[in-house]
Amino acid sequence: MRKIITITVLFLSFASFAQIKVIETVPVEKLGKVNNNYIQKIGDEYTVFYNCIQSDDENNTLRKFTFKNIDNDYLNLYNIIVNGFAATPLYDIKLELPNNYVWLHYTASVDKPTVQFMVSNKEGNANNVSEALTKDQVSKLFQK
């Protein structure tokens, strides 16, 4: 009987002071992808990764901006971008995100109009510009 109690106490002491804890993980879902640009979803948070065309560091040209899907913001962002292609004349749209400002810069070209993400953080010390995307590429990126 004494051995059973001793083993139980030792087991409980190891269980209560364990260094390894199991933490619940949220699955990472990679949505659409166009060239090196893609959208990643973790829970209700969306991150848009884009290839920066004006980077000094050629090895690290991938940049990102993140937002939560509150009030269906993911679909709203897609609709804002797509509706911007139909505007005449094409005009820039400024969006405010929690940590960044994003300008949607539209360019009318001979082939097709394009949009670029022009992103700056709210501290104002980083400005990045994405490569130009057509309307079809935006739809593929957002899986629409």
Image (cartoon, rainbow, N blue to C red):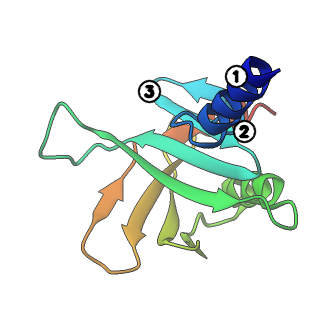
The label on residue 7 is: 1
Q: Nearer the viewer, residue 64 or 18?
A: 18
Closer mark to the observer between disc 1 and disc 3? 1
Q: CA distance from mark 1 to mark 2?
A: 30 Å
Amino acid type indicated by mark 2: Glu
Q: Decide if residue 22 is in sight here.
A: no
- Image side of residue 41 versus residue 96, left or right: right
Residue ID for mark 2:
24
The label on residue 57 is: none
Do the residues under discs 1 and 3 have CB atoms within 8 angstroms? Answer: no
Q: Residue at x 57, y 42 (%)?
A: 17
Q: Nearer the viewer, residue 94 or 114?
A: 94
Circle 3 Cα neighbour tier, 10 Å, few/some/many (<14 / 14–19 / ≥20): few
Residue 109's spot in the image, x, y percent?
A: 48, 44
Q: Is residue 142 above or below residue 1?
A: below
Residue ID for mark 3:
36
Q: CA distance from mark 1 to mark 3?
A: 56 Å
